[in-house]
Image: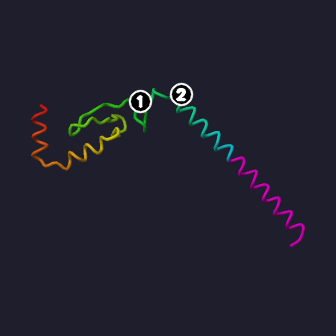
Amino acid sequence: MTDKDRFGDKLRDKEKAEEDRYFAAQDRAKVEAIKDKQSTAGELALGLCPRCGTALAEHEHMGVSIDECAACGGIWLDKGELEAIGEREEEGWMSRWLRSVLES
């Protein structure tokens, strides 16, 4: 291998390292911008659709409160609500009917 080849390899390594540093700095800046946006939104985002930002409407489904977005049709569940719906689904039709009669 000649000195010219080694010098070319070192130049390519230096260029790659500079490129890596540039993109790492870009990524850090983007992450900071996202963190800033999230911290300023804070509690304002509560009750808004995570997908489109429209206010969520609360509905009852099988005795469980779910949040639904009228704009995009998304359905959002809080912790434990999916499991509660799953448990109700496993009940027989008679249990579901009896619960609907008693709740009315």
Compared to residue 4, the image places residue 96 above or below, namely above
Residue at 35% of width from left, 31% of height from top? 56
Task: Characterize the magenta stretch by its predominant secondary structure.
Answer: helix
The residue beneath circle 1 is 46
Residue at 40% of width from left, 31% of height from top? 48
Is 89 displayed left or right of 23 in the figure?
left
Magenta region: 1-23
The label on residue 40 is: 2
Place of residue 17 in the rendered image (x, y in percent of width and height, measured from the top left): 75, 53
Can I make out residue 73 in this image?
Answer: no
Nearer-N-terminus badge (2/1) = 2
Compared to residue 42, the image places residue 31 above or below, namely below
Residue at 78% of width from left, 59% of height from top? 13
Q: 13 or 99: nearer the eye?
A: 99
Q: Is residue 16 magenta?
A: yes
- Going by the numbered disc 2, the residue's amino acid type is Thr
Place of residue 43 in the rendered image (x, y in percent of width and height, measured from the top left): 45, 27
